Amino acid sequence: MTLPIALTCGDPSGIGPELSVKAWQKLGTQPAFFWIGDPRHLPKGSAYVTIDDPSEAPDAARQGLPVLAHPFPELAMPGNPNPRNAQTIINIISRAVHLVQSGAASALCTAPINKKALQDGAGFSHPGHTEYLAALAGVDRVVMMLACDALRVVPTTIHIPLQDVAQTLTADLLRDTLRITEAELRRKFGVARPRLAVAGLNPHAGEGGKIGLQERDLITPALESLRAEGMQIDGPLSADTMFHARARQNYDAAICMYHDQALIPIKTLDFDHGVNVTLGLPFIRTSPDHGTAFDIAGRGIARPSSLIKALEMAAEMVRVTALTTP
């Protein structure tokens, strides 16, 4: 029997709790997952079953959302994050990682957190979920991928100001990003011969040095060294011509130089079904590609489509990894 997926509650003042119930209503036992959080934060009248161990989740899911209870110091109010709850949100992420690494759960799916709320309430020192998970796993470098049916994108630099991108982008960072992406496409997505398309940093990919030198001096040499290792890479390419339908047929993932260069096309193509995947971890982690949405929390109007897709993608990655791991 496949182990269930661990789903963290995220910030309980956001839309995570209501989306988790909606996801169970849609998915039931396929795939089986359990929610880690305080049952008081679920919408009133929600069907849930408290479990003592993740192994109970598949059976419990026949009756309601399986809940591995983790009490919070304060009752969460929709739309109003409470600083006193911040440390518990962090602790639940850590608990979920332990459950996955210990073999009690097959994968990790994380509901949205609000970094500022965690910083204000608990001195959270990481830029986001991705970096915290890397620290918990003891991994030096991970890669953030956004994926939907039409496109997979990877930003080489992530949550930094645009003015800092050029100085942060290095040949080592780019090579590591490409190597991790290729390896994980093979292992967790079952792509036998990954094709990677790499965007330039500047307009028109620098236009031969007329609109910037990073393509000539940094990106191209890095890509040539990886091609010499046998990787299938196209680029650097002009980012404004990489994402139309015909171009997307030529690669399995697009590697971009900064956050918005990667996220704008995927959110334009499929805003409701994008999934955040962390590559390079020793376990599978997915997350819906949206935030806590404090402005609509508790109103019952949040769409669960991205969370449902994140759980389904995690389950598929578990299946593929089992086939590709010796």
Image (cartoon, grey):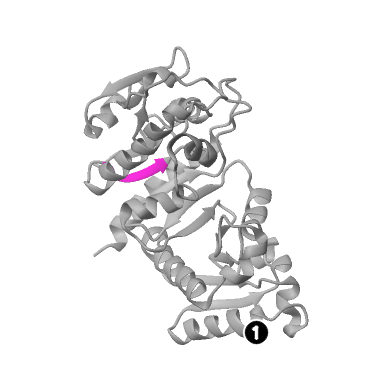
| Part of the protein shown in magenta | 105-109
Measuring 52% from the left and 38% from the top, which residue is drawn there? 114
* Quarter containing the C terminus: bottom left
Measuring 70% from the left and 62% from the top, which residue is drawn there? 244
Does the image show residue 223? Answer: yes
From this view, report whether residue 163 is shown above or below residue 283: below
Q: Predominant secondary structure in magenta? A: strand
Residue labelled with disc 1: 216
Question: Measured from the top left, where is residue 259 in percent x and y?
Answer: 61, 57
Could you say which quadrant of the image residue 209 lies in? bottom right
Question: Measured from the top left, where is residue 194 in percent x and y?
Answer: 47, 70
> Along the line of sight, which residue is nearer the eye, 204 or 132?
132
Question: Measured from the top left, where is residue 272 in percent x and y?
Answer: 60, 41
Question: Measured from the top left, where is residue 201 in percent x and y?
Answer: 66, 71
Does the image show residue 313? Answer: no
> Along the line of sight, which residue is nearer the eye, 17 or 148?
17
